[in-house]
Image (spheres, helix red, strand yellow):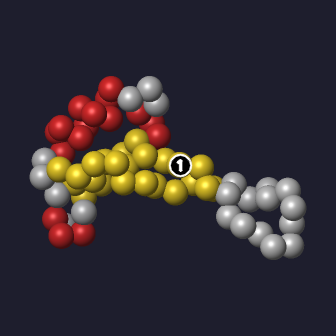
Amino acid sequence: MYALEYKQLYIPREALTKNRTCQSYRWKQYAVCEEREPLEQIKATKKRPEEWRVVPLADSV
């Protein structure tokens, strides 16, 4: 099983600062499939394919 994920901007909450200078990102799951090829095709159609990835899920390793 494989998952198609996209990168999403994430700004963690910091209680002591107001400007929130620490910016990061997290990966959000978009789709799951038994085979890798359909997910790679979806990734190729996106505007920014470098912000997408296909990863194996834990049960398929």
Quarter of the picture holding the C terminus: bottom left
Looking at the picture, tell me which residue is in the foreground, 58 or 14.
14
Rendering coords of residue 9 (x, y %): 59, 49
Give the percent coordinates (x, y) of residue 19: 85, 56
Q: Is residue 54 left or right of residue 49?
A: left
Q: Which residue lies furthest to the bottom in this view?
A: 15
User: Residue 21: image x %, image y %?
Assistant: 79, 56
Q: Quadrant of the N terminus?
A: bottom left
Counting from the top left corner in percent of width and height, residue 10 is at 61, 55
12 lies left or right of 20: left
**Residue 18 placement, left or right of 54:** right
Total count of labels: 1
Q: How crowded is mark 1: few (under 14 residues within 10 Å), some or many (20 or more)?
A: few
Q: Which amino acid does label 1 sit on?
A: Gln
* Label 1: element kind: strand
Name the residue rendered at 40%, 42% in the picture.
52
Q: Quadrant of residue 22?
A: bottom right
Give the residue at x 18% y 70%.
59
Where does label 1 land, which residue? 8
Q: Which residue lies furthest to the left in this view?
A: 34
Where 12 sits versus 9, above or below? below
Picture residue at 45% right of the left edge, 36% below the top: 50
